[in-house]
Image (tube, helix red, strand yellow):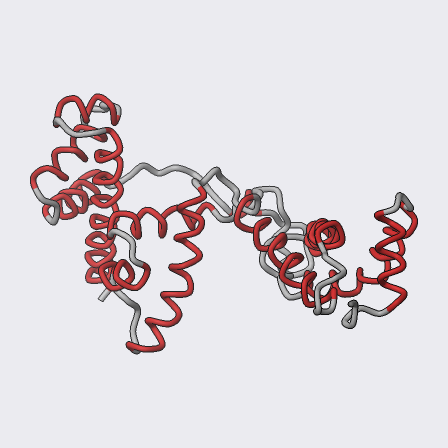
Amino acid sequence: MIVAQDVDFVVLIESYRGGDEKARDRLVERYMPLVRSLAGRYAGRGEPLDDLVQVGSIGLLLAIERFDTERQVQFTTYAVPTIVGEIQRHFRDRAWALHVPRRMKELSARLTRAIESETAQRGRAPTIAELAEATGAEEDEVVEALQTSEAYSTRSLSQPLGRFGDDETMQDVLGGEDQGFDEVEDGALVEAGLQVLDKRERRIVELRFFDGLTQSEIAAQIGISQMHVSRLLRRALHVMRGRLEDSMQGNIR
């Protein structure tokens, strides 16, 4: 017995399933305000609102197709998670400027939540080890996910900056005359970064960036898998970056 659905809804959805396409159009029109409301929750995250509404509309169509009119729940109760799921999937699968494996996207999302909760709980930013424990991931995977999260969005060099009401773009303010680099100081900074690595990590960095070997060549020479080389290299660069930032901040002080 149908008790949770209004009669008009049941008539429309049964008419559609009987072959009346106009009935589906009327259902979509009726529930589009719901789609726009849900899409609006995700506005301002780097994706145009119109695109989010379009993705949400797909979720609405799926809900119409899959909903069982015999269920003792309102259609909106079923439709909301279906629509939101499509929007969230859009962010996970498409709203990345560069290709990133799905497992890294999912871990990145978990890390975002973990960083917020751990920071609130500890009163400081969590360490890599603490994030690994909070998410159930390996430390190397945490480092990799934090780095890949930087691929979430990019900005066109020709995009106006919107400053002072003019049409100045990023390429107008970046760059300049190249006066060369202070090789001695850079060399000292790199050496300081290498010093904090263990013997194997330092060797991998030297083979990759000093000798120009590929990761597969390094793997053959070190005697480990290419994936292991990739993880060790990412970890080493993350550690070196932290050491170099500490050194530069010390110089500023």
Front in this rendered view, residue 61 or 188? 61
Q: Position of residue 126 (x, y in %)?
A: 28, 67
Label total for image: 0
Where 155 falls versus 123 (above or below)? above
Hey, which quadrant is residue 250 in on the image? bottom left
Q: Position of residue 178 (x, y in %)?
A: 39, 37
Where 219 falls versus 99 (above or below)? above
Hey, which quadrant is residue 72 in on the image? bottom right
Q: Position of residue 113 (x, y in %)?
A: 42, 65
Q: Position of residue 12 (x, y in %)?
A: 88, 57
Front in this rendered view, residue 78 or 191? 78
Question: Residue placed at 61% from the left, 42% from the top?
Answer: 158
Say whether residue 170 is left or right of residue 185.
Answer: right
Question: Residue placed at 69% from the left, 50% from the top?
Answer: 55
Q: Quadrant of the C terminus?
A: bottom left
Question: Residue placed at 21% from the left, 21% from the top?
Answer: 217
Name of the residue lying farthest toward the left:
199
Where 123 falls versus 106 (above or below)? below
Say whether residue 169 is left or right of residue 222.
Answer: right
Q: Quadrant of the N terminus?
A: bottom right
Question: Residue placed at 18% from the left, 43% from the top?
Answer: 190
Hey, which quadrant is residue 52 in on the image? bottom right
Say whether residue 140 is left or right of residue 35.
Answer: left
Name of the residue lying farthest toward the front:
1
Front in this rendered view, residue 23 or 235? 23
